[in-house]
Image (cartoon, grey):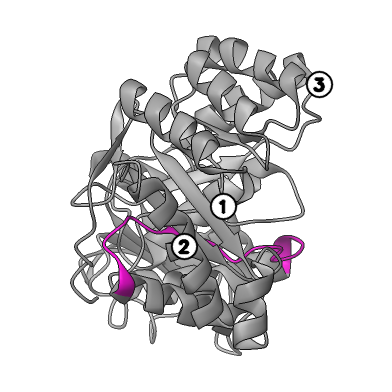
């Protein structure tokens, strides 16, 4: 794991983005903006799943009515997603939003940019600039010939400079693409170009299976190089699945440690217990466990206490039975039907 990029630390409600703050997980409501009750319920579901920043679309003035009920329902920082209409940004700020996502270059003349910058500075509201391959300015696109990583970074810095002109620099930048390689290159360039916190994501990543794979490659590879301060896994699916996937990415690369880390073997012809079923059951039972432990579910003695000896606790399958082991040392032999419960008992002792 590379040393983390030194980015500006920005306050958002009761937490921070960037600097030495933890990587924060975001998601976005996908309930129609006019459905206030549905939006509140989905926000509560996301908060319960551990989501650390919740964004929602504010397409018109009526949607500003979402802010107060959601703020009353959850204690998670809220982001208003606004396109083009600077009056919605002013209204969201007046109603207590915690962060605004808007591109200053799309809202009109300098007086409008200044109005948004002034109210956000006064109220301590950061602004996220969000650039993607389909939102580039015509001049920038013409200059680069295509939505290249360099073109997207140029666009992001153009928007940032508009805010800087009015003494505003509590800025977060995202430069997303649906193409994983383009996304990675764009963020690498942005990391060199500025010290603003970076919000990582592969946009329009797809449905659950491919969306998670593309996000894991794009987001994960950047995080292992120290780039990134907040993340969102974009899925054509329930937002709560985005949160679980994001935490799994952080867990896989060692950036989330307040939970168990499960390792299990893919099985082979030596396996004589239902290891796949057992591994899935163990994973389900560990969902709410907060212990920073490594748990191994292995198919046989060959890959058990030896290969997984660094595990805090584990099981290795035998012929209708299994060996429980702790840090590579065998504890006892257990019949297959009792393996799950005996393993969970040992986990409770840790």
Q: x and y percent of residue 133 in the render?
A: 66, 71
In the displayed structure image, the side of residue 35 where residue 114 appears, left or right: left
Kindly indicate whether the residue at mark 3 contacts the one at mark 1 (C-beta within 8 angstroms): no
Q: Which residue is drawn at 55% across and 78% down?
A: 151
Residue 158's mark?
2
First reached walking from the N terminus: tag 3 or tag 2: 3
Q: Residues within 10 Å of mark 2 (few under 14, many from 20)?
A: some
Q: What stretch is highlighted in magenta?
A: 193-209
Q: Residue at x 60, y 75 (%)?
A: 140
In the displayed structure image, the side of residue 6 where residue 346 appears, left or right: right
First reached walking from the N terminus: tag 1 or tag 3: 3
Front-lying residue, 341 or 222: 222
Whether residue 208 is in magenta: the answer is yes
Kindly indicate whether the residue at mark 1 contacts the one at mark 2 (C-beta within 8 angstroms): yes
Q: x and y percent of residue 89 in the render?
A: 57, 29
Q: Residues within 10 Å of mark 3 (few under 14, many from 20)?
A: some
Where 237 falls versus 52 (above or below)?
A: below
Q: How far apart are marks 2 and 1 (CA)?
A: 8 Å
Tag 1 residue: 105
In the displayed structure image, the side of residue 291 where residue 283 appears, left or right: right
Judged by depth in the image, the label closer to the viewer, 1 or 3, is: 1
Q: x and y percent of residue 222 in the render?
A: 39, 73
Front-lying residue, 245 or 230: 230
Label 3 sits on a secondary structure element that is loop
Residue 254's mark?
none
Tag 3 residue: 34
Judged by depth in the image, the label closer to the viewer, 3 or 2, is: 2
In the displayed structure image, the side of residue 5 where residue 124 appears, left or right: right
Label 1 sits on a secondary structure element that is helix
The answer to whether residue 51 is visible is: no
Q: x and y percent of residue 279 in the render?
A: 54, 61
Q: How far apart are marks 1 and 3 (CA)?
A: 27 Å
């Amino acid at each position: 794991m590379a040393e983390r990029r030194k980015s500006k630390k920005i306050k958002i409600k009761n937490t921070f983005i960037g600097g030495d703050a933890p990587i924060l997980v975001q998601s976005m409501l996908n309930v129609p903006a006019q459905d206030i009750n549905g939006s509140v319920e989905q926000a509560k579901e996301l908060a319960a799943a551990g989501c650390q920043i919740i964004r929602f679309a504010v397409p018109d003035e009526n949607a500003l009515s979402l802010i107060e009920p959601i703020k009353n329902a959850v204690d998670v920082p809220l982001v208003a997603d606004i396109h083009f209409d600077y009056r919605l940004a002013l209204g969201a700020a007046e109603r207590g939003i915690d962060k605004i996502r808007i591109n200053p270059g799309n809202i009109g003349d300098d007086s409008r940019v200044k109005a948004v910058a002034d109210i956000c500075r006064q109220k301590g509201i950061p602004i996220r600039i969000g650039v993607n391959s389909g939102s580039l300015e015509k001049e920038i696109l013409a200059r680069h010939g295509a939505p290249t990583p360099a073109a997207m970074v140029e666009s992001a810095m153009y928007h940032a400079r508009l805010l800087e002109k009015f003494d505003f620099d509590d800025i977060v930048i995202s430069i997303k693409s649906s193409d994983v390689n383009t996304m990675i290159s764009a963020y690498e360039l942005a990391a060199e170009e500025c010290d603003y916190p970076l919000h990582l994501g592969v946009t329009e990543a797809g449905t659950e299976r491919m969306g998670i794979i593309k996000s894991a490659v794009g987001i994960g590879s950047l995080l292992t190089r120290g780039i990134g301060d907040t993340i969102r896994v974009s899925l054509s699916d329930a937002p709560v699945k985005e949160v679980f996937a994001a935490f799994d990415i952080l867990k896989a690369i060692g950036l989330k440690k307040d939970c168990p880390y499960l390792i299990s073997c893919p099985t082979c012809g030596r396996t004589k217990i239902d290891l796949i079923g057992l591994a899935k059951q163990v994973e389900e039972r560990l969902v709410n466990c907060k212990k920073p432990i490594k748990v191994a579910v292995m198919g046989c003695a060959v890959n058990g206490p030896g290969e997984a000896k660094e595990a805090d606790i584990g099981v290795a399958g035998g012929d209708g039975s299994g060996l429980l082991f702790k840090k590579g040392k065998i504890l006892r032999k257990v019949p297959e039907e009792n393996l799950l419960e005996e393993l969970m008992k040992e986990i409770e002792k840790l």
